Amino acid sequence: MKPRAQMRMLSDGRRLHLHDGPIDLIVECFGVAGEIQSAYDAACARFVSILDELCAELKALRQQCHPDSDWPEGSTARRMFAAVLPFAGEYFITPMAAVAGAVAEDILATMTDAAHLSRAYVNDGGDIAIHLSEGEKFVVGMVERPNRPSLFGTLTISSDHLSRGIATSGWRGRSFSLGIADAVTVLADRAAVADAAATIIADAVDLPEHPAIVRAPACELAPDSDLGDRLVTQAVGALTQHEIEAAIQSGVRTAERLLRIGLIRACALNLCGETRLVGVADDKSISSAMHERSLVHA
Amino acid sequence: MTDDDPIRCDACPVLCYIKPGRTGSCDRYGNRDGKLVRLDPHVMLDRAVERGGSVVPFLERSGDWDGTLASHGETFVTAIGAGTTYPDYKPAPFIISSQVQGVDMVTVVTEGIFSYCGVKVKIDTDRHLGDECSTVRADGEAIGHVTTSEYGSQMLSLGGVRHLTGGSRHEGTATCAALLNLCNGKAVELEIDKGATVVVQAGKPPVVDGVQEERMRVGCGSAAIGMFAKQWFGKVDDVVVVDDHITGVLSEHQAGKLLGIPETGIKLKGRRSTPGRYFQVAEPGTSWGGTNIDDPLSILGKFNAKKAWPGLRLLMVSTTGEHHAYFELDKDLRPREKELPAALKESVARVKENCEPAMCTVLFMGGAGGSLRAGVTENPVRLTYSVRDAFTRVTCGGAPVYVWPGGGITFMVDVTRMPQNAFGYVPTPALVAPIEFTLKLSDYAALGGYVDQVRPLDSISSSKGNKRRVSAHGDNPWPLASEAKSK
């Protein structure tokens, strides 16, 4: 039988594209040619079974995580669970909040175990796991809205910085959000943790009960959503500058708390064109190259 | 099962339950009216059913048939619904190959987001719509301006990056909405500062200040004299063809002189250009010949008593034949209106008959810049060179385009030759338009194309999901026809 997963090199001959169901990864490794090939071979070998493993435990992974919940079985599922566990006491969160970051992390770990690489990244729809050897760095662009081509800032992560995970969450993205942030981008030590934290912070950027915000129970939109009947954001109408400020500030407070306990390293919050940075001033390795967005024209 | 029931997607083991109008967790499959569908319908132009005069939705056919046609190069995939990719270094959503006359042809199909775009509108009318450079408004916002008058028509230039992104938010939104509607063949009401209100719809007659324009002028007043002088000869002593631009007078005109028509002592207001040709006989307007006059005699001075004679027969007619009046001079050499003699009725009807139906033409104009080209090839400038050297054919929804010489790929296309609703928009605001590049596979490889992304047409034809088959537009050359050069 033909495998369901698609695995192929992109036309640039450098990047590997892995696709299966809702998982879509762009992978790139840097280093000696033979090592890169070994890494890609290992990534493909791991990738073929990853979606089936997750789906086998999908029901449990969609349940709210409590500090005393049972751990799942699969390696990716365990990464998801480990990532959301620190949030479980205080927030509503399910392991699914970390699925994209955990998949990226799992594939990256498979590659770095199999080969010696100077740099590597696995980009799972914007949730990115990175590997940096001594003296190396990555520059990452941040996008406010998935349907718009503009970057609202760039991040430079160098090897002396501890972050190895980048994740972005917001109501305009593929997953439902309880908040109204256009985008919350988080740097954390691991991609799965960044993914979970971005979800929590994006949920916190909110104006509860505001009439210009259209919400609907998640289960009415997607019957099997892990968010059940919680209200998820469907549209955000016109907000005053004051309201935008208040909503961002609410997210900033959550981000600062997560920063203090070491769960995240830095965070950029974006709402209606306004951007706030948390943790960037302390961290010289992250550039604060936030600039006016420039359109990419056809 | 009711309409609101979710369906279960079996495309992958996640097995999403998808509610009507929603997509699964992959964003690729959705529930449309209870049916599992791949998103983004593709519009396929079908050469097999052409000469229909216009583009119509095509009936479903069997899968076998699709394949047969595809392998004969009879199906062309347009970019409508292809989606766009960002960032732009990702290959365009669909790169299709099909065999045409034994040569592998590649069509790169994408939908571009055009911030640099607009429409050029040609309105067939003699009426004065507004001064050159006057602002054209839609929804109260400035969306463009009046540009040159052309032969029997008035040109408008609408949109462009300055109105889309350079003004207020509302100006951009109003511009985008007007362009979108014009390009998709819908009627749009435009107001011209200190001018007319005109309803423009591609392929339809313009409606100026509530009156539908019927006919396009046969020519300017002077040209009309030249065209009909022989038919008037002997039936009337003088003819004035009233025109806001160039009013013609038969007895003074070269055409009249050649026929030996004597001087009549007629005197016109306005500025004489050359014999029998007058500029500015009145103010511009929406009446006789695009002037503001309702009484044609108001453009005449007193007849010269040394040359005119009682009983002199004078016909005055507008450039479209829509307005006409017949006079004879009384004993004091004053024109008196009389019923048009039967012999002249025919010539007035002839003027009308020679006027084509008035129409609005809408050409979309856009520029495919660096980032869109990057979706086609890793070496974007080579695509430009290839288009310029005619190795690559550019089409827009399957319709032929005119590519401007010079840098970049700036093109114009007649929106009535494109499938219906070919245009979309993004709230940036900018228009989304289909664009296809067709070239030989070998040439595609040579210019750094994404050869590994090329999919055979059969895989599009037979793939699950939504395609809209439309018949080819009768007037369009087939996009894959062999007139493109080969290296």
Image (tube, rainbow, N blue to C red):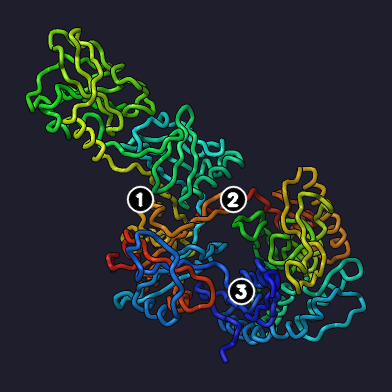
Question: In this picture, is B385 found above or below B295?
Answer: below
Q: Nearer the viewer, mark 1 or mark 3?
A: 3
Residue appearing at x 80%, y 55% in the figure: A205
Query: Residue B316 has which mark?
Result: none
Question: In this picture, is A234 found above or below B101?
Answer: above
Kindly give the residue lying farthest to the bottom in the view shown.
A1
Element type at mark 3: strand
Query: Residue B404 has which mark?
Result: 1
Tag 2 and tag 1, C-beta contact below 8 Å:
no
Count how many numbered circles sit on residues in the image: 3
Residue appearing at x 44%, y 52% in the figure: B367
Chain letter of mark 2 equals B
Chain letter of mark 3 equals B
Image quadrant assignment for residue A161:
bottom right
Q: Which amino acid type corresponds to the residue marked 3 in the rendered image?
A: Lys
| Residue receiving disc 2 | B428
